[in-house]
Image: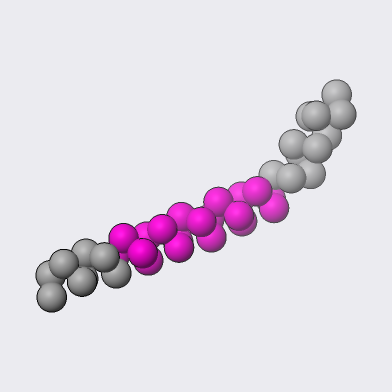
Amino acid sequence: MEYMQVQILIYLGYQLTMSIYHYLQQELSEELDIKMML
């Protein structure tokens, strides 16, 4: 049971990290595009 709980926590943590990563990518995409043009 404990092993399964650890696996679930790792999975949820990974999903949360990916969600935040994609959110930050969308938020910073315009600024990054402007910097790349310069």
| Quadrant position of residue 3 | bottom left
The main secondary structure of the magenta stretch is helix
Residue 23 in the magenta stretch? The answer is: yes
Image quadrant for the C terminus? top right
| Image vertical order of residue 35 relative to residue 23, above or below | above
Residue at the (55%, 51%) spot, across then down: 21
| Image vertical order of residue 28 relative to residue 7, above or below | above
Near-viewer residue (31 or 37): 37
Hey, which residue is sitting farthest left in the picture?
A: 2
Left or right: residue 17 compared with residue 35: left
| Image vertical order of residue 13 relative to residue 36, above or below | below
| Quadrant position of residue 22 | bottom right
Image quadrant for the N terminus? bottom left
Residue at the (36%, 64%) spot, across then down: 11
Q: How is the image coloured?
A: one colour
Hey, which residue is sitting farthest bottom in the picture?
A: 1
Q: In the rendering, at what x and y percent does residue 5 appear?
A: 21, 71
Near-viewer residue (31 or 9): 9
Hey, which residue is sitting farthest right in the picture?
A: 37
Left or right: residue 33 compared with residue 11: right
Q: In the rendering, at what x and y percent does residue 6 appear?
A: 21, 64
Residue 11 in the magenta stretch? The answer is: yes
Magenta residues (range)? 9-27
Q: In the rendering, at what x and y percent does residue 29 appear?
A: 74, 45
Near-viewer residue (2 or 27): 2
User: So how many labels did they put on this image?
Assistant: 0
Residue at the (26%, 65%) spot, across then down: 7
